[in-house]
Structure formats: structure tokens, C-alpha cells
Image: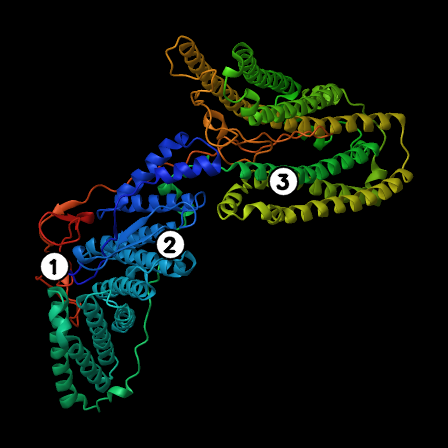
Amino acid sequence: MAGVSTNLLYVDYKKADRLAFAPPLKEYIAQSYAEDPDVYIDDFRNLEGLRGDVVAPDTHVASLNKLLRYYGQLMHLSSKFPMDENHIKICFCWYNAFGKDKDRKSVSSYNVKFEIASIIFDIGAMYSQLAVAENRGTGDGLKRASIYFQQAAGAFKHIQDSALEWGLPSATDLQAPTLTALTNLMLAQAQECFWYKAVVDKMKDAVIARLAAQAAEYYDVAHQSAVGASGTFTDAWAGQMQIKANHFRAAAQYRKALDCQGTAKYGEGVARLQYALGFIKKAMEGSSFKKATQYVQADLKNLQQTLQAALASAEKDNDTVYMEPVTRTEALQPIGAANMVTPHSFPAPSQITDIVGPPLFAKLVPFSVHQSVSVYTHKKEALVNSLVTKLTEATAVAQSTLASMNLPAAIEALEQPIGLPKTVIEHSEEVRQQGGAQSLHDTWATITALAEKDNGILVEAIRTLDEESAEDENMRAQFGPRWTGPRSAELTPNLRESAKVYRQKLDTAKKSDLLIKAKLEKNLHFIESLGLTKPELEASIPSSTQSSTLVTRDPNVKQLKQLLDQLNKNIKRRAPLVAEIKTAAAADDIAPKLVDAANRKEGAGDDEGLFAEQLGRYEAFEGTVRELVEEQELVLHEIRETNDLFHASHQTTTLIREREQALQNLDNAYKAFREISQNMAEGLKFYTDFQSVLLRFQSNCRDFASARSVDKRDQVGGLMRTAAGIGGGGSATGGPALPPRHAGQGQQGGGYYQQQQPPQGQGQGQEGYAQPGVWTPNQAPSYSSTPYGQQPPPPHQQPPQQYQHQNQPQQQQQPNPFSPNVAYSSQPLTSMPPPMNAQGQSGSGGYRPYGA
């Protein structure tokens, strides 16, 4: 049994024979996904390479990362491929972790969850071995060891918590009693590290006693579970757990006795020392102690000697000096345990993406899922567009209503009859800083150029399909029935449908471009005025010499200002809200749920339920939009009433009205500038992002045409050889034709285009399936900000340098944990383990983590 060469136990790995994922998965891809499985040859190679790396790991952090990486990829894989006895049959065979190598029994299952559980078990075993390999003679080494043990406990507990749901086979090392024993054993050893650190740091005896009591409790639970594990554990392992339980009960009583002496409870101190020696006696009884390692025996004998000496001294002092009655054992108060450890939560793949890396087979999505994602995307975009449109229309209503009342210009003209109001100065400075009207002209030119380029890419892609189709028809006309194989139209419905979608999006975007152009032309003159210098702008606005003292005393002006401020705050909340809605929509990917449902054969009838659940995420946004619109309606109503009172309370001259109109024109121009700038920014992003989609589409069309061209040459060559009597090709009598290079399994074909080309409205978030957003031609056109494709994952963390080899345990002065004053001795501490090599055994050539 591994781990018996130290005073701590570590778990051996489960071992497995190699297996091949590729054949059954390729067959499933061809049949269920209607794609060419050879497209994923790199994914198969990486998957089987990962599996090969973990079947016989060595003890190293780099190997731990390989186990975690394979675990994460398995979790991703299980969401795409139903690997069980009823679907994809891959025989996962693993050998039990306990017992001699030649005696270890193997357990097999078609359930991929068995493979996952076995890998998690080996991750727990790896953590336990890394913990034992730590140099526990240092504070940092003790901390790392304790963390590793808690991570090991978390791995074993995760298997136990998931076993019922996963339906694991009856492997002895994956049964509940075994996992309970291992979990508590790891926690006991983690707690032991805390106890030892407290001893080294000379903490209070009462604290050390409580730490020891908790270690004893963990060891005791581990021993009881090991006994109930149907002979899984050897007598040496189960015996060591029992010995350590009694050992730490004695250690707890010893430290509590020292605490009693410090608080003048001499009779109780003597009783606890006697009680402690009783636990030592239990630990040394029977054959278990003889089978224990020399380190466990030495620890116990060391404590026994310390206790005997302490008891003799305490009894002498009490008999001659203190003469307190010795407390009866049954009257001793229990020592409250101080728990310092807990099983660390086992990470989900999403929590260790830097180790797992990008999922394998990321582009593999069933055609039925494509269609469902398209439907959901349409629903989602309709909902998002409706929310954005409500806010946009509400803003337009507010602006037009204020403009019709010349607000806030009417107030500013009266409050400041001469010069520029503060708001006009601020707006003018902002417009100049952003480049003014010239920046809009330049951006518009860029948008026009991008739109023309995008249109050209789409036209060229469609021309490629048309030319290939025309060539195919020419061949059919030339060779007649001898020309076999599917027509181009039968192989390109997805490409043609995508081209139609892309054309519709470009046409819709063109309409929005025209709206922006019209808005720019309408407001250009006043936007140019805002770009003037302060003296030039001031000279362009009429001034009035009429006194403004009346308006300052008008209570309606104060009320109007408050209402206008309330309305402005309402409107300012909308841009962040729209950005939040679009961000949520961009991250909203229903494909994984649909893939999971499809793999469980549950997707066909439950799509609407999934759609409703997913769209429910937007209810909070809908409520916020409704509140903003309703608040605006109330505020505008009050503004109208107050403005009527304001106009009735003062008289205006022609000059004042001209100044009002000039200020209002500048305010409208500023709002138009910001709106046009935002629309153009969205347009730039739309056309830029859309160009990458169109280039992929064009590449798919060219790949398709190229593959078909090769097919045509092969078939023509075969027909010519047949005509010449050479043979080897298709014939007029119906001989077999060469298989098309572009087609995979199923009627839709596969190859170069099938796996990459989405149907209409495909959702975002998956590289190769991104779709441009819809730019609705309304008063406030908007481009979709949906990202195209996934961002590259962060680089993998580099493992630490290879551990050094060392032949002998480190000889250094260590504190004696059982000495009353923690005196330092010149002898090496017996609880320090010797070095451990890659196979987990002590001896020369040992593998020494962290220079231990």
C-alpha cells in the first residue's frame, strides 16, 4: 500500500488502459451531426493525447494540470456526446486504486461519468501525494501541505456527492464508505498540519489541545468508515487511522494538562495525563501498532515518554506541594475541538479555463440546434429591439416636445439676455473636442467605403456559387445521365440561405445609412455653428437689452428648471441601460442548453420552454424601461402645464423670440450631433464586424467551389477512361462514381461548408456562427454590438520548475511537538517524512518538491 513510508498516508492513482475515442465519435458525428468527422481531426488528436497523459501520471504540479485539463474537456465533451450504454459505446476500464498491482480488480463502464469520476479520484490522489511530498519542516511547507490535503478531500467529497446522480458502477474505491474514509483522512492530515504549526509557533496549550482534539475526531471518523468499506483498506491503513485517532486524543489531553498546570488545576492536570497514557496504551495494543510504520511508532513512543515524565513530575508536585484531589476520569470536561480545515470545493471547468483551455469540438453543433438557435435569436433580437426602440422613441418624444416649447432656450434667453449661456458654452466645447462637423463627414466617408466593400464581398461570394452551379449544369447537359452526383442546388441550401440573410442585413443597413445622411444634412449648419470659437458663436446669437429681473422672481421658472432636470436625469439613465441590455444579449447563448437537451433527446418538444426560461432574464429590463417611459409621461405633462403658466406671466419681444430660437437651434444641434455620432459609431462597428463574417462566408463558398471542381475533374477523368475502355470510373451503365470530396454524411452534406455555415439568425458566441445584428430603419437606427466569435483564452499557467532529487531526508533542527516547552533538539523530528520519488516511495533518487 502506497504511503506507508511516512507518518502520513497518501492515495495511489487509479490506473487505466489506453482507449480510442476517435472511431465511435466519428461515427456519431457523421450520423447525428451530418458533418464530415475528418474536419475535427485535430480535436481527436488532442483528446486522445490528453487521455494518454493521465492514465499513468507522475506526481508533479504539471501532471496535476494535465488531469484538470482532461477533466474539463471531458465535462465539455459530455455535453455534446451522449457516451453511455444506449448511445455512443466507449468502454472505460479502470483499475482500483487499492491493493497490490497484480491484485487490483478492473471495473468497466460505458458511462462517461465513470471516466470523469476516475479522473477526479486521481486528482484527489495527486493532491494527497503533493501534500505528503511537501517539506513540513517549514511554515510555508505546512501551509501548502494542508491546502493540498483539503483539495484532496474536496475531490473525494465531490465524487461522493455526485455518485447517485452519475450512476457510477460498483468500484470499491468509488463507494460511499471508501470516499467518506478518504475525505476524513485528508481532513485529519490537514488538521494535523495546523496542529503541528501551532506547536512550532508555541501557541497556547489550550489552543493546541483543541486542534489535536479535532484531528483525533477526523481520524476516528476515517477509521470507522474504513472499517465499513468492505475490506477496501488494508489492516495497515485502517490501523494507522485508529492509532492516529488515539495518538491525538492523548496529545489533546497532554496539552490540556499543561494548560491546567498553568491555571493551578493540579489535580485535573494529573488526571488528564493519566487519561492521555490510557489512549497511548490503546494505540499500542494489538497487531496494528506492530504493522505501523517506524515513523508512526516513533511518534507514539515519543509522546509516551513525554507523558510518563510529565505524569511523574506532576504527581510528585501534587503529592508534596499542592495536594489536590485527582479528578475522576469520567468527571473531566470534554476538550472542545477547533476545526481549521474543510473540503475545498472542486472546481467547475469554467473556474479553471486558464488550465482547461478552449473546449474541443467547439464548432460542433447539431443542425437541429442551429435551427432552434436561429428561432431563439430572432425572438431575442425582437425583444431587445423593442426595448431599445421604446427608449429611443421616448427620447425623441421628449426632445420634440421640449423643442416645440422652446425649452430650455426660452428660460436661458430671459435669464441671460446677453452673451452665451453656460450650457451652450459646454456643448460647443464638447463638439469642438470631438472634431465638429468635419469628424462626422470623415466618419460618414468611412462608413460608405466599408458598406461598399462588404457589398462587394457578398456579391463575389454569390458569383462563386453561381459559376459553380452553371458549370455543374453544363456538365449535366454534356454528359447526360452519365453525370452522377447531387446537383449544386441540393448541396448549397445553407449557403444560399445565409447569402439571403446577409443581403437583407446589408439592405436594412443601407436604409439606416440614408436616415443618418438625411439627419446630418438637416442639422449640418447648426452643428457647424457649435464648432465655432466662443467669440464667433456669441456674435451669431441675437442679444437683448431687456431686463431679466422679472423672470428671476417667477416661481414657474424655478418649477420648470426642476422638471427639466428631472427629465434630463431620466434620459441619462437610458444609454447605460441600453448598453447593459445589449451586453446581456451578446452574452446570451442558448446553444449549450439546446445541445444538452438534444443529447438527452429532449430538445424536440421543449424548445419553447427553454426559450421562455431564457427570455425571462430580460423581465427586469422590461420593468425598468416601463418605469422610465411612465415617469417621462408624467414629467412632460407637468412641464406643459408649468410652461403655459410661464408664458402667461411674462411678455416677450421679437428680439427675445429670435434669441430663444437661436439658442433652441443650438440645443437641437447638440443633441443631433451626439445622436449622429452614436449612430455612426454603431455603423462602423456593424460594417467592420460584418466584414469578418462575410469573409468567412466567401471563404466557405470558395472552398465549396474548389472541392466541387476537384470532383468534376475526377468524374470527367473516370468517364473518359471508361469511354477508352480503361475502366476505373463511372459509366453509362451505372458504375460507381467517385465519392464527392465535399460531402459528409446525410443529405445536407458536410465537408468544407456544412460545419461552418449557420442558418438564418444563428446566435452569437461561437466562432464561425456569429451573425450581424439587425439595424432597424427607424428614427434612431442602431447597429448590433454583438461580438463575432470568442476571444482567445488566456495563456496556460506555466508549471513550476521540476522538483530536485535528493537521497536523504533533510537533516535540520526541528521542535519536539511533545516537549512541554517545545525545546529544539539536534535530532531530526520523527514526524518529518523522508523524500518521495515519482512513484511515491522513499529512497534514493527521490523527487523533492520545493527543495524539501
Give the color scheme: rainbow, by chain, secondary structure or one colour.
rainbow
Residue at 76% over, 46% down: 630
Q: Is residue 405 left or right of residue 71?
A: right
How crowded pointer 1 is (Cα within 10 Å; few <14, some 14-19, many 20+) is rated as few
Residue 362 showing in the rendered view? no
Amino acid type, label 3: Lys
As helix, strand or loop, the secondary structure at mark 2 comes to loop
How crowded pointer 2 is (Cα within 10 Å; few <14, some 14-19, many 20+) is rated as some
Name the N-terminal-most of marks 3 and 1. Answer: 3
Please tell me the numbered disc located at residue 813.
1
As helix, strand or loop, the secondary structure at mark 1 comes to loop
Q: In which quarter of the view is residue 150 placed?
A: bottom left
Pointer 3 residue: 380
> Which one is nearer the viewer's eye here, 406 or 761?
761
Q: Residue 298 placed where, x, y %? A: 11, 68
Front position among marks 3 and 1: 3
Q: Residue 536 placed where, x, y %? A: 71, 19
Picture mark count: 3
Is 506 drawn above or below residue 355 in the view shown? above
Residue 728 showing in the rendered view? yes
Amino acid type, label 2: Phe
Name the N-terminal-most of marks 2 and 3. Answer: 2
Q: Is residue 678 left or right of residue 705?
A: right
Is 192 drawn above or below residue 741 in the view shown? below
Distance between the alpha carbons at the discs numbered 3 and 1: 68 Å
Q: Residue 361 placed where, x, y %? A: 42, 37
Name the N-terminal-most of marks 2 and 1. Answer: 2
Residue at 37% over, 31% down: 41
Is 723 drawn above or below residue 650 in the view shown? above
How crowded pointer 3 is (Cα within 10 Å; few <14, some 14-19, many 20+) is rated as some
Pointer 2 residue: 346
Residue at 58% over, 32% down: 785
